[in-house]
Image (cartoon, rainbow, N blue to C red):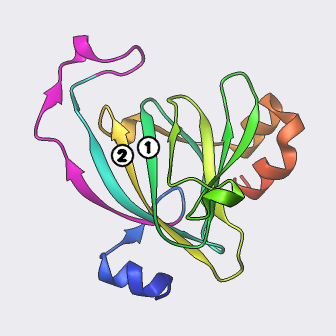
């Protein structure tokens, strides 16, 4: 099975950050604004979940959320989640099935962390589920500006240029 099989079978559509997705769960319960962590506003669902697929040609570009995001590996070749935390430290983290090679089945990306994801195998793809808590709202999503990230983290130029668009 290849990427096109999963894109069609799961009815995935293009995501603004790159890759393909479909929301599969949005909690019927919500949190009031006064119960939310600092930085979030308005009412939020307790949690949301999507299928998300990236390919070697369609990576996930650098972005950040105001909520934590949990990634769960399902199918395909290993995925590298590239993170730059609030302290400016870069970490590549592998998702996949080969635990002996340092891959993991799941990973948590903390809120306010810049992150993107790649598939290193040419022609490869990775299918994951992503759960956001409190639930995802596009108003809490920020796609990275190449120039701003380079200004803030010049030491990470190579990965920033790989996972951002020319402005």
Depth check, front residue: 81 or 88: 81
Query: Which residue in the rendered view is the most extreme toward the top?
Result: 34
Question: Secondary structure under badge 1?
Answer: strand
Looking at the image, tell me whether mark 1 or mark 2 is earlier in sequence order.
1
For image coordinates 77% across by 48% down, the residue present is: 160
Mark 2 lies on a secondary structure that is: strand
Q: Where is residue 167 in the image (x, y as percent from the top left)?
A: 71, 52
Examine the rendered structure and indicate whether residue 61 appears above or below residue 122.
above
Give the side of residue 147 with respect to residue 66, left or right.
right
Vertical placement of residue 150 versus 116, above or below: above
Q: Name the residue under label 1.
A: 70
Residue 17 tag number? none
Q: In this view, does 46 lie to the left or right of 94?
A: left
Q: Position of residue 71 (x, y in %)?
A: 46, 50
Q: Quadrant of residue 10?
A: bottom left
Q: Is residue 29 magenta?
A: yes
Looking at the image, the residue that sits furthest to the left is 28
**Residue at position x 36%, y 46% in the image:** 131
Q: Give the range drawn in magenta.
A: 19-41
Label 2 Cα neighbours within 10 Å, binned few <14 / some 14-19 / many ≥20:
many
The residue under label 2 is 131
């Amino acid at each position: 099975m290849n990427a096109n099989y999963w894109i069609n079978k799961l009815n995935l559509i293009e995501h603004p950050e790159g890759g393909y997705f479909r929301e599969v769960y949005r909690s019927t319960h919500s949190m009031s604004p006064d119960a939310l962590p600092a930085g979030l506003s308005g009412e939020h669902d307790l949690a949301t979940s999507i299928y998300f697929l990236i390919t070697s040609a369609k990576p996930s570009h650098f972005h950040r959320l105001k909520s934590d995001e949990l990634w769960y590996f399902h199918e395909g070749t290993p995925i590298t989640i590239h993170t730059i935390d609030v302290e400016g430290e870069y970490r590549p983290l592998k998702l996949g099935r080969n635990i002996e090679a340092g891959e993991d089945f799941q990973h948590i990306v903390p809120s306010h962390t810049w992150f993107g994801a790649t598939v290193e195998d040419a022609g490869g793809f990775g299918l994951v589920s992503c759960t956001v808590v409190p639930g995802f709202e596009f108003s809490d999503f920020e796609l990275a500006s190449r120039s701003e990230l380079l200004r803030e983290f010049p030491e990470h130029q190579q990965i920033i240029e790989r996972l951002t668009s020319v402005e």
